[in-house]
Amino acid sequence: AQSVTQPDIHITVSEGASLELRCNYSYGATPYLFWYVQSPGQGLQLLLKYFSGDTLVQGIKGFEAEFKRSQSSFNLRKPSVHWSDAAEYFCAVGRDIRYGGSQGNLIFGKGTKLSVKP
Amino acid sequence: DGGITQSPKYLFRKEGQNVTLSCEQNLNHDAMYWYRQDPGQGLRLIYYSQIVNDFQKGDIAEGYSVSREKKESFPLTVTSAQKNPTAFYLCASSIRWAGYQPQHFGDGTRLSIL
């Protein structure tokens, strides 16, 4: 079955430092991949998405993600973190009905909480 | 602006009481979803609807019910059978049920037990 793993539950970085959040997926073909951000008490906002083509995807708020098929990864990066980036980040993969399941169209990871030190 | 409106933002339930959470979208999306979010557990799917007048159970449907009588509306009822309803509830929609379609989310409803 398809799945998404975010290995880090909680990450703390200093303001101005670089950031990389990890995401691994299980899938057979080229997946549809997404990153979302959730501020406390809010809904999820789409940061970026990957469907095909260039493996480096640019998103909003200065974020980017790189798709690496050989590693089944879609890591999120930002060169310089701002205090306002403190939030929870969710990686998701689009469900392929060939792999079974009849649930939501996206499978979400359990999230990584980002804290930013001043 | 198009979007998803969830109401109320905060809701309190007494023991043995049913409560209904509202979700309205003006994005003209076919598919809609309800999630429950508890600390450290990510998003868990309660119900989803691929099209109006149709809905399916998700992973944790017990104690919940939904309806989809209008394309723009997908209300969730938390029944008294749900023994631990305290959580943050998120409604989402997508243009259609397809793996390449992103979901758009409302701002959530926080339900607490009195």
Image: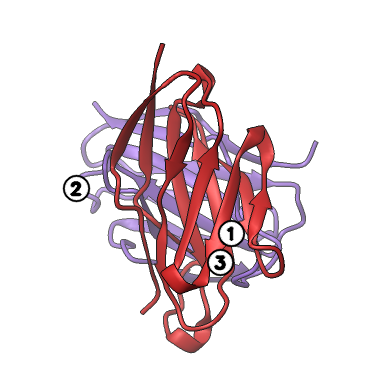
Chain colours: A red, B purple
Please tell me whether mark 1 sits on a helix, a strand or a loop: strand
Q: Nearer the viewer, residue B101 or A56?
A: A56
Label 3 belongs to which residue?
A: B49
Rendering coords of residue B94 (x, y %):
65, 59
Q: Amino acid at mark 1?
A: Met
Q: Residues within 10 Å of mark 1 (few under 14, many from 20)?
A: many
Q: Residues within 10 Å of mark 2 (few under 14, many from 20)?
A: few
Q: Can the viewer see residue B47 in this picture? A: yes
Q: Nearer the viewer, residue A67 or A39?
A: A67
Q: Amino acid at mark 3?
A: Ser
For the point 53% across and 60% down, the residue is: B67
For the point 77% across and 56% down, the residue is: B28
Q: Nearer the viewer, mark 2 or mark 1?
A: 1
Circle 2 chain: B
Q: Is residue B63 above or below residue A20?
A: below
Rendering coords of residue B3 (x, y %):
71, 41
For marks 1 and 3, the one nearer the N-term is 1
Q: Amino acid at mark 2?
A: Lys
For marks 2 and 1, the one nearer the N-term is 1
Residue B32, labelled with which disc? 1
Q: Nearer the viewer, residue B104 or A81?
A: A81
